Image: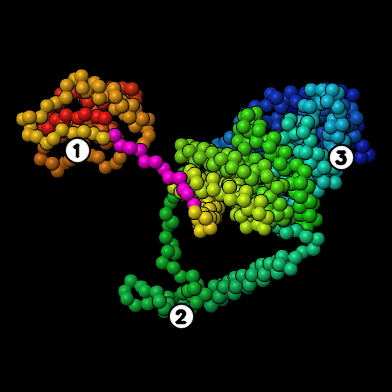
Amino acid sequence: MDVELQATCSALGYMEDRVYIKEPDCIETVKDLIRFLRRDNDICEIRRQLGHTQILQNDLIPLVKFYHKDKALFETVIKLLVNLTQPVITCWNNQIPDEKTLRNYCIEVEGYLQDYKEAFIDEDFFSVLSEHIMEILKLNWDELREEDKLQLERLFVLIRNILMIPPDPAREKCTEDDASTHDRILWTIHTSGVEDLILFVASSERERSMLCMHILEIISLMFKEQEVEALAAAGVQRSVTEKEKDQKELEQAREKEKAQKKANILKFSGRHSRFGGTYVIKNMKSISENNVIYHKSLGVAKTFSYDEGKAPKKVAKNRVAIKGDDGIRRSTLSMRLILKEFCVQFLINSYNPLMRAVKDALTRKTTQDNDETYYLWSMRYFMQFCRLHCKRVDLVGETMSMSAFHYIHTQLLNYIENLRIIKDLEEAKQVGRRTHVALKAYQELLCTLDFMSKTQDEQIRQSAKVIQSNVFYVFEYRDIFVNMLRNFKESKCSRSYLRDLVEAAHIFLKMLEASSKSSKLVVQKKKAKKKKKVKKQPACNDANVEEPSEEQLVELWEGHASSEIVTILQGHPELPEGLSPFDAASEVDVDGQRVETMVNIQQFLRDQKFSEAVALFRAAREVWPERNEFGSDSMSQDDELLALREVFMARLPSKLYKMLVWS
């Protein structure tokens, strides 16, 4: 460990008889630690050394608990805690390194963060945070200073960082209906009063405009491991269905274990294999037409396969299917009841105003990149909880509108376009996860809309009918599922994403079918582009054909031919495939085929077949690259446009020239 850093850590204070005693220059020492972290290197050496010394567990948390009345010291320690608890990806410039040594350092820092999370399971610590948050919230608007606003924001950022620390199931070894580290943190937040302050800030207009995004992140992190169905169905006692489900799962596990033991007994028999006997496996053909003759023990015969011993086909690293892991688990009943009550209070008092404030911040782009993911996740989660438990559409009226459909549809289109463009695999996987979140939000909008159309309230049914008419009328909303299915790649999106996509498409089609049966549905159709007519001269003999004059060719080129070719060169639309300029079996020599290809390119240009002309021009460039007659690979789009213009204007020995009059 660095000597200066070790001396600085020793100068903070010490614990004596369960009371922490600070040194006289403790506040300056904390400031020195902040400066150390500010000058940390690329491998986070200072951060790893501070985690190794357990300075947060041994010094910083006791300082907050015993000396929170010292305002200057408390604010400085909070600054240091916010820095130490920031996510791992932030320490490496928002990108997890691929190099082995750096990846090990990254895992080491994450392990220290998980140690920090266990240390924060302290009700006294969160009570101190709750007390300071309450003091700032009690101040009037004229008494509130800029330093108080910054301190309030730091306190909520610290809570967010604590909840954001990822769990380690192998380390915690928690089963279902057991209290994990994250559950114990939530219990501490509940008992210390921080939970009530979160609800107050979400419902207060003054603080909501400043802290809306932090509050939404905290709430989404609180429920990230909870399944909506289990939370909505949580009661004071376990339901009969839940008991039967647990008993059935236990019986299945016991039967599986018995079958495995029996198979092991047959497999590892004490008898020598040469006395195992000979068997004939029915309904399995050998190389001949007879059944397979098997010489091994009977226990192994059940698992016989021709694929045994074959090397599996190797899949490229960038094509390996993603293994989806949602991290959902069932907490204890008491924890689920607390979170269920929080959901109900949040929906009644805070959901609509908070989501309105967050949507406004996202529209004005005052948030950080990709913060819309929290908005979409919260929309899906609480709308589903409201549909399953509260069954009151007015509680989620802010996000149940056509503007919500339009916003999610726009986000889905952006994500799909990014998935198609991005080449980096890790970045594409992140975009795929965001696409999945947006898809589930869109699916929940459809489910809520279907619920509204089947309710007994006439006013709600009419509102659902208005929204349905808009959603079914616009063809962009209908084509989104087809577009997403076409662009699905298992190396970028998980199988759970595909399952949710198919389910969402099924819900949409069932709603469309029901709506079309109940009322006459008028559907907007895409308007086909009118192709510009080409007036051709009557067929005539070769002797009477005239080639267009230079003035006519210039007029035709500057009309709309150049603009159409520029659009094609930029990649819209895609070029046709299968055009080959060279035929090895042809009786024409190479030079003759080169001249014939140039004539064909000119004929395509003059016949307004610009995509075929560009495709044939680029294909010929690969066949005859030596004299640059068809350009070079390094030429720009402007140079390629000029080259095509020269071909268009050239006097080539064509068999037949057509006089074109373009409308």
Looking at the picture, which amino acid does disc 1 mark? Phe
Residue 529 belongs to magenta span: yes
- Taking the spot 63% from the left edge, 29% from the top edge, the residue there is 364
Q: Earlier in the sequence, mark 3 or mark 1?
A: 3
Residue 316 image point, x, y percent: 44, 46
Residue 398 belongs to magenta span: no
For label 1, the residue is 582
Looking at the picture, which amino acid does disc 3 mark? Ser
Classify mark 2: helix, strand or loop.
Answer: loop
Q: Is residue 398 visible?
A: yes
Classify mark 1: helix, strand or loop.
Answer: loop
Residue 446 image point, x, y percent: 58, 51
Q: CA distance from mark 3 to mark 1?
A: 80 Å
Q: Nearer the viewer, mark 3 or mark 2?
A: 3
Q: Is residue 516 above or below residue 583?
A: below
Name the mark on residue 277. 2
- Taking the spot 81% from the left edge, 39% from the top edge, the residue there is 200
- Taking the spot 41% from the left edge, 67% from the top edge, the residue there is 306
Q: CA distance from mark 1 to mark 2?
A: 65 Å
Q: Nearer the viewer, mark 1 or mark 2?
A: 1
Q: CA distance from mark 3 to mark 2?
A: 74 Å
Q: Which residues are magenta?
A: 521-532
Q: Is residue 355 above or below residue 141?
A: below
Classify mark 3: helix, strand or loop.
Answer: helix
